[in-house]
Each structure stands twice: as C-alpha cells, then as structure tokens.
Image (cartoon, grey):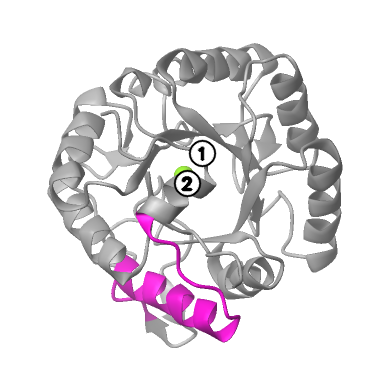
Amino acid sequence: MNEPCIISVAITGSVPRKENNPAVPISVAEQIESTHEAYEAGAALVHVHVRDEEQRPSSDPERFAAFQEGIRKHCPDIIVQFSTGGRGREPAQRGAMLHLKPDMASLATGSVNFPTIVYENPPAFVRDLAATMLRYGVKPEIEVFDLAMLYSAAELANEGLIERPLHVQFVFGIKNALPPLRQILDFELSELKRLMPDATWTAAGIGRAQLEVTRWCLELAGHCRTGMEDNLRQDRDRRTAGNAELVRRVAHLCAEYDRPVATAAEARRMLRLPASPRA
Ligand code: MG
C-alpha cells in the first residue's frame, strides 16, 4: 500500500479577510468550527494563526489557548500546529504561545522577501525560537521559503537545536520568493534526502499554484497542505465555500494517486508525535 498522505489545513493565515471570502474563519469559535469540518473531510493537522477583533494578525496567547482547548473537545487527536509566522506580529511575541505546548509550531529558518515586506528571521531569532520549541517539546515544521533555509535547518539539527527526524514544508508561489517550478522541488528533495534521509516533507502552493503543488506532493510520496491561508478559490470561477471543501478536493486527489488519507492517529505515528496530545 502506498504511504498515507497527511492533509494539513491552514485555516486562516495572516492575510485573507472576510471581504475577500466570508468563509475565512476569524473568531476562535469560527476557527474551531472550520477545523472540525476540515477534520471530518480528512485533515489530520491544523495550522493556526489567530486574529484580533479587527481581523488583524495577533500573537495573543489567550486566543491560541482558547482555540486549543476548544478543538480538543471536538477533534481530540488532530495535530495542532501554531504559527510563529511574522506578518503583522511583533518579533518578540511570535513565540509567546509556545508554553501552551501545541503538538507543533512553524519555524522559518531564514529571511526572505514577501510581496511587500521582508519576512525577517535573523539567525539569533531562529535559534531562540528553536530552543524554546525544544524546551517545551514542540516539534517544529521547518518552513523553507528559500533554498538556504533547508541548509540552516540541517545545521540546527546537527547542533541539537532541532530533534530529528525533521518535518519540512517547501513553500511555492509567494511573490518575490520561490516560484512554483517542479525542478526546484526536485532539487530541494534530492538535497533533503542527502542531508536528512529520515525527514518527512510537505509542500504548499500559494494561490493558483495550490493544485499543481498538491499533485507533485502526491506523486512524490510527500504530504499535502491546503486551506484558506493559501488559497481562497475552489477554481477559476468560484470562491471556495471553506476549508472543508478545499480538504475534500485534496482527499479526492489522494484517491486518484492511490494514496490513503492519513487519519490523525496515523499522522502522529508518521511524524513521531505522541499518540495523544499533551495539551
Ligand atoms: Mg502560516
């Protein structure tokens, strides 16, 4: 049997607002409901950003805590991954919720240009976030927005600041960062296999790139990411009805590539996470 595919759902992100698509979950209650629907559609992992009352990105640990507590009631075993992403957040606050001990948190291991800003992750800052995750037993998902970030992640693992096996996400389609080109992913994967043969991996395609990147992941035995953080449309003519509809599309594609959809329990085993959440 082929390797089961872990479907991650990035429900909210930092950028999309209700004006762009009213189905974007903004309040914690909406986020819990949207995650629950996505879980029932096949998502085993939820990637979470929180927002304030004005829909702006927030680092408020209380919002993260409320999400985590709520989702544990509805989807007890879903893998909870908090974002330490930078857009619209104070650097010092980006890891302020890690003491809540989510299963995972995102960790970008370098800086990169985004459409209108520099996404700043200076070396000392990355090391500090990695050390905090290690202290709280939070597994990082390494965000590779640019090639150097892969080598920086390997270096952090060599130093013991990140525990192996790593889980790596390659990101494509952000303006000014890497374009969605298959030969880039092929090269990244060959380097991943050389540097960290035990690593698991996924890739995210932003906007129009989402579907094509999903197909590459399924073909190459990777895992998949979808969700309204990355893409608000179901196809060229129609906005998506929500995170669950995007997850259902990936689940259908899994069948096309003969990849079973991983349950949350299977995903925990594949990512070497505890069988049940600690928090
Ligand atoms: Mg994110």
Residue beneath the point at 31% across and 38% down:
276
Q: Position of residue 142 (x, y in %)?
A: 61, 37
Residue 198 inside the magenta-drawn segment: no
Quick check: 104 left or right of 21?
right
Quick check: 216 left or right of 237?
right
Quarter of the C terminus within the rendering:
top left
Question: Which picture quadrant has residue 234?
Answer: bottom left
Residue closest to the far front: 1
Q: Residues within 10 Å of mark 1 (few under 14, many from 20)?
A: some
Quarter of the N terminus within the rendering:
bottom right
* Above or below for 103 versus 200: above
Q: Position of residue 261 (x, y in %)?
A: 45, 69
Q: Secondary structure at mark 1?
A: loop
For the question of whether residue 205 can be seen, the reply is no
CB atoms at circles 2 and 1 under 8 Å apart? yes
Q: Is mark 2 within 8 Å of ligand 1?
A: no
Which residue corresponds to mark 2? 269
Badge count: 2
Quick check: 243 left or right of 106?
left
Which residue corresponds to mark 1? 272
Q: Residues within 10 Å of mark 2 (few under 14, many from 20)?
A: few
As rendered, which of 177 and 191 lies closer to the eye? 191
* Above or below for 231 versus 76: below
Residue beneath the point at 41% across and 28% down:
89
